[in-house]
Amino acid sequence: EVHLVESGGGLVQPGGSLRLSCAASGFIFSNYWMSWVRQAPGKGLEWVANIKEDGSEKYYVDSVKGRFTISRDNAENSLYFQMNSLRVEDTAIYYCARKLAVAGTSYFDSWGQGTLVTVSS
Amino acid sequence: AIQMTQSPSSLSASVGDRVTITCRASQGIRNDLGWYQQTPGKAPKLLIYGASTLQSGVPSRFIGSGSGTDFTLTISSLQLEDFATYYCLQDEYYPYTFGQGTKLEIK
């Protein structure tokens, strides 16, 4: 069974940094793209970043480019999200998700339970 | 970025009703659209991918259709467990974009 467990969320001041982790199990982690998706309190879902199986390609939503970095350690079956220069508007639950590609399309078939990041002074 | 316009934003319906949610993309996205269901306090759950393919384990009352710019999610006969918020997601172009969501409530 696929299992994704996020950790590392918490309260941080504006301008601060935080590193999220996502521990993966139940599948061959190195065979899949992985993603981060966030949800501000009471708001909708927002895709934030993707990383290719081997880490060679990374994509970000414009609002986090230059501040956040997605990475992975396939030996440790772990996904990471380094978040720098945090802003109040980055406050959200951050989900890691597995991206499955099949027959020319792709989708997020498995999600973690999320970790809450609160940016506030 | 591609805008995904989802409607309605909220919907009241009864058990047994047939309901339809629509998503319109600001430009063509072929069939690279998925539908996700989210209940309060939970992670999203994939229902439909490739616009019309039912994810394994999802009941057949969930039906997706469309291609290009116009997509629909139909629930043929609402069950109690279907009252939730639904999102479409395009993953044809970066940045991926979600619709704003449709909250389905019990009438």
Image (cartoon, coloured by chain):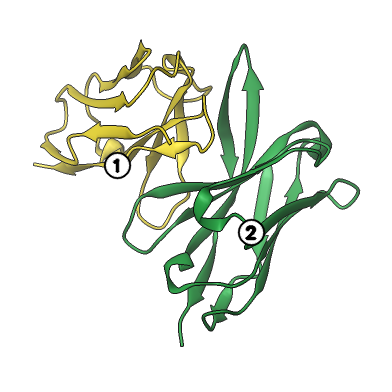
Chain colours: A green, B yellow
Where, by quadrant of the figure, is residue A114 drawn?
bottom right
Outermost residue to the bottom: A121
Position above or below: A56 against B34: below
Q: Label 1 is found on which chain of the structure?
A: B
Can you say whether B11 is above or below A22 in the image? above
Residue A11 rendering spot, x and y as whole percentages: 54, 80
Q: Secondary structure at mark 1?
A: loop
Q: Are marks 2 and 1 in contact (CB under 8 Å)?
A: no
Task: Single out the residue that lies furthest toward the right.
Answer: A75
- Expressed as whole percent of the image width and height from the top left, the position of residue B1 reads 43, 36
Residue at the disc numbered 2 = A66
Local crowd at mark 2 within 10 Å, few (<14), some, or many (≥20)?
few
The chain identifier of the residue carrying mark 2 reads A
For image coordinates 45% across by 82% down, the residue present is A120
Nearest the viewer among A112 and A85 is A85
Instruction: State the residue in front, B5 or A37.
Output: B5
Above or below residue A53? Residue B74 is: above
Question: Which residue is pictured at 91% across the width and 48% down the height?
Answer: A75
Using the image, tell me which numbered label, if any, was put on residue B101: 1
Q: Nearer the viewer, mark 2 or mark 1?
A: 2
In percent of the image, x 31 and y 60: which residue is there? A42
Q: Are marks 2 and 1 on the same chain?
A: no
Please tell me which residue is depicted at 25% across the width and 41% down the height of the picture. B83
Residue extending farthest to the left is B107
Q: Is residue B97 left or right of residue B19?
A: right
Kindly identify the amino acid type of the residue bearing the numbered disc 1: Gly
